[in-house]
Amino acid sequence: MTTHHGPDRPDRPDRRDRPDRPDRPDRPDRPDEIEEHDLGLTHDLGTIAEQRRSLGRRGLLGLFGGLGAVAVVGCATDGDGSSAAASDTATSSTAPSTPSASASTGGPGGPGGTPPDGAPPGGGGGAMGGDSSVEVADGEIPEETAGPYPGDGSNGPNVLGESGVVRSDLTASFGGPTGVASGVPVTVRLKVYDLDGEDATVLEGAAIYLWHCDAEGRYSMYDDGVADENYLRGVQEADAKGMVEFTTIFPACYAGRWPHMHFEVYPSLAEATSSENKLRTSQLAIPDATCQEVYGVVDGYESSVSTFAGVSLDTDGIFSDGYSLQLAKVAGSATDGYTFNLSVPV
C-alpha cells in the first residue's frame, strides 16, 4: 500500500516535551458563525460555574477544551449524586455489547458478524473495554474498544496506509471505490489536548482517525454490500488550536449499541499509519434528543427506530460505566444538519 502522508517527517520528541511548532495560519474567519471554543475564557468560566455541581471533577475537566493551555484549579470532587461522571474509568469496566445484527443485512462482516480475518467481535482494540495497557489519568477521555471494524490494520484491512485517507469530507469513498454515504449532514469538531495533571495544552499536529457506520448500520470495508467501499473513514491533523473537523453523516443505531462514532488519537500524521502508534481509542456518544429528531423522521433511518427504542446510554455496553466526557455537544437540526463538538483530553 502507498503511504498516505507524502514525504516523511523528522521524528518528533515526546508529545509532552516537544517544543512548540511554528505558528500556522488559522482557518478563514467565519463571520456568520461564532464557535463555542472561540468565545473566550469568560464564557468558559461561566459555563463551568453552571455545570460544576452536576458534573463533578471529571466532567468539569472536559469543559476546558476551549482554554488552550490552562491551569485547572478548584475542581469539585465527585459527589454521591454525580453517577455518570464518577463512573468514568480508565477502561470500560462493563464488557461492550457487540452489535448483534446489521440493520440492513446482518450478514457475515456486518455489525455482529464475524470479521473477515475470523477475529472475535470486539477486537481491534485489545481488551473488550479497550487497550488495558493504556494509562488513563483522571479527567482524560476514556479508553474504549475499537470494535471489530476499525479498519486500522489491527483487525483485517488497513485504510490508514491508503493515499487519500487524510481528508475532512468522509461521505464518499476514495482511491477507486465510488460509493457515497447518504444521510443527515454532520460536522464533527474535536479538540485534542494533553492533560498533564492540572495543565491542559492543545496538541497541535496530533492526528485523529474517525470512523462510524452509515445510515443503514453498515461499516465500510467489512459489511456485506459495502466491503469494497471505504467511506465514513478519514484522518485529520490538529491545527494550532488543537482542532480537527470532519464532514460526515448521522450514523444509524444498530442492535446492541447506542448511536456513536469511533476515533483514535495519534501523536502525528506521520505516525497515523499503524494502530500500534495510537495514544488513545475512544468513542463519541450522540445525545438522546438528537437521535430522536432523526430516527423515524428522516428517510433512510427507518431501521434505527426499533433498535434505538431498545437501548439507552445507561445500558449500553460501552457508555454504561460513564459517558460525561464522551457526550457530544450538538447544534443544528435534522433539516439543516448538525455540528458535534467534543473535547478530547489525552
Image: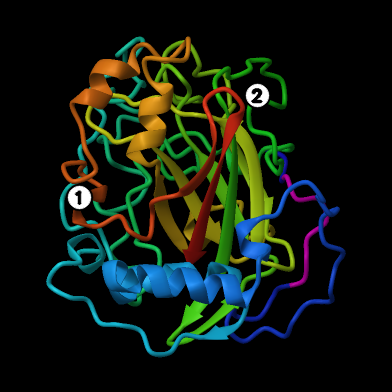
Residue extending farthest to the left is 80
Magenta stretch holds residue 72: no
Instruction: Judge by depth and name the residue closer to the eye, 217 or 75.
Output: 75
Residue 320 badge: 1
Residue shown at 12%/72% (left/top)? Answer: 80
Judged from the image, the secondary structure of the residue bearing numbered disc 1 is: helix
Neighbor class of circle 1 (other Cα within 10 Å; few <14, some 14-19, many 20+) is many
Neighbor class of circle 2 (other Cα within 10 Å; few <14, some 14-19, many 20+) is many
Residue 182 badge: none
Instruction: Judge by depth and name the residue closer to the eye, 100 or 299.
Output: 299
Looking at the image, can residue 79 be seen? yes
Name the residue tied to disc 2.
173
User: Which image quarter: residue 8?
Assistant: bottom right
Residue 35 coordinates in the image, percent (x, y): 66, 55
Residue 13 coordinates in the image, percent (x, y): 65, 81
Question: Residue 172 vs residue 101: left or right?
Answer: right
Dot placed on the residue nearer the N-terminal end, 2 or 1: 2
Residue shown at 16%/42% (left/top)? Answer: 315
**Highlighted magenta segment, given as a residue range:** 4-10
Instruction: Judge by depth and name the residue closer to the eye, 68 or 292.
Output: 292
Residue 237 coordinates in the image, percent (x, y): 69, 56
User: In the picture shown, does residue 198 fall above or below 151?
Assistant: below
How far is mark 2 from mark 1, CA to CA? Answer: 33 Å
Residue type for callout 1: Ser
Residue shown at 35%/73% (left/top)? Answer: 52
Which is more foreground, mark 2 or mark 1?
Answer: 1
Question: Residue 83 vs residue 213: left or right?
Answer: left
